[in-house]
Image (tube, helix red, strand yellow):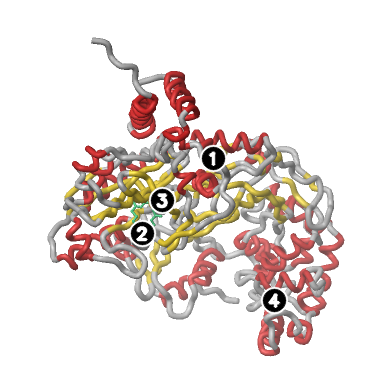
Amino acid sequence: MTSQPASPAEEISRLREEIRKHEHLYYVLDQPEVSDAEFDRLMKGLQSLEAEHPELITASSPSQRVGGVPREGVEKAAHSVAMMSLDNAFNEEEIREFDARARERLAEEQLDYVCELKLDGLSLAVRFSNGLLSLALTRGDGTTGEIVTENAKTIRSLPLEINDAALKSAGLAGADFEVRGEVVMPLNSFQRVNSERLKADQPAYVNPRNSAAGALRTLDAKITASRNLAYFAYALHADTVPRSTHWETLETLSSLGFKVNPNRTNVSGIDGVLAFAEESFAKRDSLPYEIDGVVIKVDSLTQQRELGFTAKSPRWAIAFKPQAEQQETILEGIDVQVGRTGAVTPRALLKPVFVGGVTVSRATLHNEDEIARLELAIGDTVLIQRSGDVIPKVIRVVHRPHDRLTFGMPANCPICDTPLVREEGEVIRRCVNVSCPARLKESLQHFASRRAMNIEGMGEQLVEQLVDTTLLSGLADVYALTQEQIAGLDRMGDKSAANVIAAIESSKKTPLARVIFALGIRYVGERTAQLLADGFRGIEAMRGATRDQLEEVEEVGPRISEAIQDFFAADRNIEMLAQLAAAGVVMEMKGPPPVKRDLRLKGQTFVLTGTLANLTRDEAAGRIQALGGKVSGSVSKKTNYVVAGEKAGSKLEKATELGVPILDEAALLSLTETES
Ligand code: IVH
């Protein structure tokens, strides 16, 4: 028996079947059975036969995936059913709340759920009539979408035609139906597209989603075809629904030839959902495409119908997107800031990103060595971390584009242009100009702060304006300010200006120790300032002291004595001190010096707890420290006294337990009573 040679129509049909089978194996199941070359040979065979017999070309032939003529413009069409979005849950509690709400509405003890990945692409609705792909619509505004049929047809994991047997077993024979799913750009294609764009001097895409959107909405399907998009189906809309669960729907989609994401599960109860979420996030970085969460859906279609929708989203589904404490973003620039001591520190300017619950656009970079250690350059994609109220920081570079810009610390102060100094052994460069406006702002804020001169109302915003308008060019200028000058500034009225002037006036009576602290001498903190005030009893005496004399003061070592002398060596500072004195600021302690410092509490440790009626915590600590005592934060066997006020808590309990003597406010006052 001799077999008849196949007719062109038969041969075309055979090739199409063969090609469809291999497309499905390769693009949907990820299980190719033939080489790329073999596949190309089949496709070329089909194309040449179709070229000879154009009357046999059909729209669903695999050869028609690579579209012909570019479209002229974008046409729109209405969605069959509105394309809604999902409500979000950001933590476990919100997921449990979602479960509780659904159970309550359905009056069920426990619900069955399907968990899927939330693919980070764009949603696409695809309609089929008589088994043929007839229309593809983007989400658009949810009611009307853009027609992108030609482009969608280039996506190899999207079937153009579904065979009768599959339709029949899905209960869809002769029915029109719509599939919904997500178009994604796999990460390897994204990287390829971006490197090609950079070579062609085109701007790189920010992320695979934008890149996929660009590819799907372009007017030229040849471009879409070159972008290697994938389509994952997650919903089926048909009038005839012989299915009772969402899980069955996914299996049906798969049997119809659609790619359904394999990372899915069905579970009973919310704990299984949380376990799936945890697993999915753990493997997030090893997936070949990006996800932005997991999606949780009530499995029963009857229950879905019963739950229904809110105005925007289904009540039977939710997207779980745990808040990342770490996020990637782009380093858009680096600026430098000048602090009170003149320290110049680099700061990362980031493309704003939501991380740890807030939008972050700045992160500290500490110093130039840190930039070198991270091998950081502008344009890099960086991983940043933020937890609690910690200042965000750059952890590492994730991607270094070709056109990155390396950053060099400026040689001069960015504010006053004075050459910066990097001392030996130091990682920080400093602006040494004491009147640098940037330093001045910081110094003034410190000067006016509560623990220093305590000038209420003179905060960051006012200081900023006072320096920018040159009303202040040094600390002492504060005492020359008038109410009119202040009232003329932004957000200041007569009343608030009067309050600031009053606060400035009363700051003149600030005790010497706090005045010394307010000067902002390097390394001179509150306690050192107190010791210096006690030791020298006046600023003039401090100025005249030798380094040895300075170091006689408790806790003053060579580093501090040097800093103090440097401070007094600057003419500008001497001038400023004279102005402060002239304005009536306390520069000396009144009365004769104590014959010998009374250190009767030396070696004794105190712990303060609760609220005292008359003394603030600082005042109580000050009284103890002035007499040589130490104040500690926690109670131990070594504690000599616990001073307990109102609402004293666990520290008091612990003291009682350990048998530590407990003082009330009156006892503390009498213990620390001095003659002066
Ligand atoms: S179900 C009513 N399942 O996430 C909407 N959506 O706001 C039902 N998405 O733009 C959507 N992966 O395109 C569903 N496995 C998944 C998904 C998914 C990604 C997208 C969807 C939509 C957005 C939800």
How much space separates mark 4 and mark 2, taking CA atoms?
A: 75 Å
Whole-percent x, y for residue 347 in the image: 65, 51
Q: Nearer the viewer, residue 234 or 664?
A: 234
How much space separates mark 3 and mark 1, taking CA atoms?
A: 17 Å
Q: Is residue 605 visible?
A: no
Residue drawn where x is 18% and y is 63% of the image: 103
Residue drawn where x is 42% and y is 50% of the image: 136
- Ligand 1 near label 2 (Cβ, under 8 Å)? yes
**Chain-order first, disc 4 or disc 2:** 2
Identify whether 155 is placed above or below 530: above
Residue drawn where x is 76% and y is 75% of the image: 478
How much space separates mark 4 and mark 1, taking CA atoms?
A: 99 Å
Residue labelled with disc 1: 68
390 lies left or right of 110: right
Whole-percent x, y for residue 201 in the image: 69, 39
**Chain-order first, disc 2 or disc 1:** 1
**Chain-order first, disc 3 or disc 1:** 1
